[in-house]
Image (tube, rainbow, N blue to C red):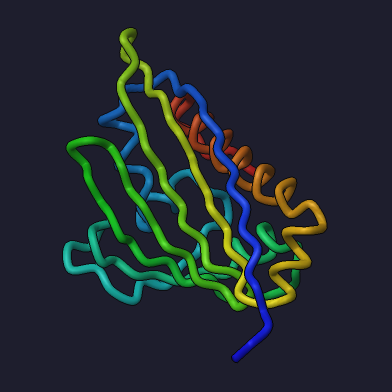
Amino acid sequence: MSSFTAKRMQVTQEGRIDAPVDQVFPLACPYEEYKWIDGWDCEIIYSESGKVEDGCIFTEVRSLPLLHDTEGGTTTWYVVLHDPDDFRVHFVLLTDISIIKYEIEMEAAADGATLIKLDLMLTARNERGNTFIASDGRKNVSAMLMGLGHMLKHYCETGEMLKL
């Protein structure tokens, strides 16, 4: 029996995008992210439809350094909920350091804009993950969510990718 006890943290950010939700929501897809995330690159492991869907799996190497302030490493993304009718997509992200539940939920505002909520719950897989959480890892996670929200907003409102 291991003496390891995992730590957990949660970060939630909300925002507004001045574009209709039916145009914003489809961009929460590994294929569509090439349009709005500068330098995005992923490997699709499984997708029956060719788009984000329940059970879609992909890997990428950009999240781990942003999330954990570490060099290299792969993040595996698994879509556990894809609900286009209610504009919700939930992922489980697996890294060597953490297991993450990442929920993206959107709704139409009365004026036709999109209200978006990004919620990320990170659970350490090992002492390295616990150290990350204890050393104010919340700043890294908040910065990543803020950056993603800003890039998505910029693309939806201007039609152009925000170059980093």
Q: Is residue 42 left or right of residue 148?
A: left
Give the residue furthest to the bottom.
1
Give the residue furthest to the top.
111
Q: Position of residue 27 (x, y in %)?
A: 36, 43
Please tell me which residue lies in front, 33 or 108.
108
Which residue appears at 30% of the width and 60% of the height? 80
Which residue appears at 53% of the width and 70% of the height? 75
Q: Where is residue 113 in the image (x, y as percent from the top left)?
A: 37, 17
Image quadrant in which the N terminus is located: bottom right
Please tell me which residue lies in front, 123 or 63.
123
Q: Is residue 76 above or below residue 163?
A: below
Q: Is residue 17 left or right of residue 73?
A: left
Residue 164 visible in rendering:
no
Residue 21 visible in rendering:
yes
Q: In which quarter of the image is residue 124?
A: bottom right
Q: In this view, does 68 lie to the left or right of 120?
A: right
Image quadrant in which the C terminus is located: top right
Which residue appears at 50% of the width and 64% of the height? 41
Total labels drawn: 0
Q: Position of residue 53 (x, y in %)?
A: 24, 58
